[in-house]
Amino acid sequence: MPHVLTLIAPPGALAPAHLNAARAALTALGADCDAAEWLAEGEAADLPFTALAAEQAIAAVRGALGDGALDLIAQPRAGRRKKLLLADMDSTIVTTETLDEIAAFAGLKEKIAEITARSMNGELDFRQALTERVGMLKGLDASALEETWKATELMPGARELVATMRHHGARTALVSGGFTFFTGRVAELVGFHEHHANTLLLDGGKLTGAVGQPILDRDAKLATLKRLAAAHGLALSEAATIGDGANDLAMIQAAGLGVAYRAKPSVAAAARHRIEHGDLRGLLFAQGYKASEFVAG
């Protein structure tokens, strides 16, 4: 079978009835299907199929299963396991937008978070929005960064995602429109080989209100994907990327397995693959890894 549909749900939410309904929906359109294979019982399963395009398969199964808490990823079976991972940080590898959390110490969280949300949905130019938000924090004591870090939490599945891909030989990189103050720490905590982000400028222990140049934006994320792929002798089809914001979309669309993760509406609509209900382990399931193969980070 040249294609596979992966069904992913929160633990315990995927039932045999879902798999039977998915198989029936595909066969009703003339597809041939092998038996479904559990990747994690009650959570993820593969359904190999042929004779349908990926978009047709997803539409048919979504129509049969409705709008329940299920993620569907359809793709060719060949080359599923990727050799390069690029991941966004804020609202992807960590649960928060770190700049919004810094702003709380200046009493500006609500105002800055509104700008962040619009920027991540593609409504504002990323560079301008970043410059504006950081400028509003001029004079804030750098201790706000440390306090923000203390409260920062990893997204469920982050460690397993990176550790498992590294164990199987993949190169891993954290690529963020946020700041190196956080990406360096997150990369070390999670196990990324490398990290790339923007730099908050400080003077006398306070934020200057400026960002180091050049700014790492959407184009820079895509350029980093291409550069790392070339450096390791890989095609873009051998890469996996994951993120939630408009500045992630170019690298999501360029990679062989680009996933919009609990993404902003405009990003989810433009991405081929989406994970909205599962955690970051969903990117492992999408590559055909069984839960028994996961490596704890």
Image: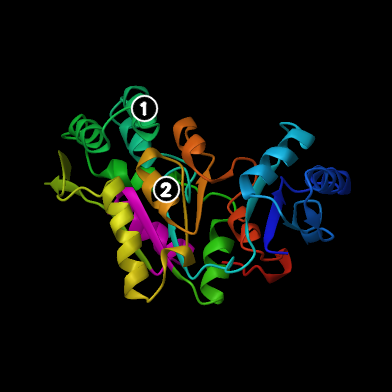
Q: How is the image coloured?
A: rainbow
Task: Tell me what residue is drawn at x 48 percent, y 67 percent.
Answer: 238
Work out whether residue 88 can be spotted.
no
From the viewer's perspective, is 63 left or right of 165?
A: right
Task: Tell me what residue is drawn at x 23 percent, y 44 percent.
Answer: 142
**Residue 225's quadrant in the figure?**
bottom left
Q: Quadrant of the N terminus?
A: bottom right
- Tag 2 residue: 150
- Tag 1 residue: 118
Q: Nearer the viewer, mark 2 or mark 1?
A: 1
Magenta part of the protein: which range? 172-193
From the viewer's perspective, is 60 left or right of 79?
A: right
**Residue 66's quadrant in the figure?**
top right
Residue 188, percent from left and from top: 41, 65
Most foreground residue, 36 or 207: 36
Secondary structure state at the residue bearing disc 2: helix
